[in-house]
Image (spheres, helix red, strand yellow):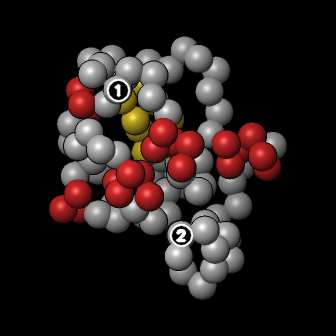
Amino acid sequence: MAKKWYPVVDVLTCVECGTCVGFCPNGVYDKTKAPSPLVVNPVNCVDHCHQCGNRCPVGAITYVGDDTGWIPPVLREKGGMPDTTPNCGCSCGCGGSCG
């Protein structure tokens, strides 16, 4: 586990879909606040793990201590800012992949 590595959620970009909260097996996020991604145990995050950020449908997660040059996949694919327009009828902006 890491002391200088943990996720930071951009609250302006986050659509509160709960993907990161539901995925993390290490208790980094407060599951009682789901789908809101509240980081409560940052030291439980695995050093250089990008899994919740890789799953975020809008690219709202970055990491304190990241020196890898990692870019959220949704931003790499779109070459810029994420499109948060819902395509599946829900409010998460996942493009239909959350259901």
Residue 5 in percent (x, y) is at 37, 22
Placement of 70 over or under 21, stated as above or below: above
Mark number for residue 87? none
Q: Position of residue 85 (x, y in %)?
A: 67, 71
Does the rendering let one see residue 1?
Answer: yes
**What secondary structure is found at the residue carrying circle 2?**
loop
Q: Earlier in the sequence, mark 2 or mark 1?
A: 1
Q: Nearer the viewer, residue 58 or 10?
A: 58
Mark 1 residue crowding within 10 angstroms, few (<14) / some (14–19) / many (20+): some
Q: Residue at x 29, y 44 (%)?
A: 25
Instruction: Report crowding for label 2: few under 14, some 14 to 19, many 20 or more residues within 10 A (C-alpha).
Output: few
For residue 39, say whether it is visible: no
From the top left corner, tell me how far across and down residue 88 is, in percent.
Answer: 63, 80
The quarter of the picture where residue 2 lies is top left
The residue at 23%/43% (across/down) is 27
Q: Amino acid at mark 2?
A: Cys
Per the image, the residue denoted by label 2 is 98
* Residue 83, image x, y percentages: 70, 61
Q: Identify which residue is drawn at 27% across, 22% down.
A: 1
User: Marks 2 and 1, how far apart in space?
Assistant: 25 Å
Q: Disc 1 marks which amino acid?
A: Val
| Secondary-structure class at tag 1 | loop
Q: Tell me: 58 left or right of 9.
A: right
Q: Determine which of the numbered discs, if any, sits on residue 46 in the image.
A: 1
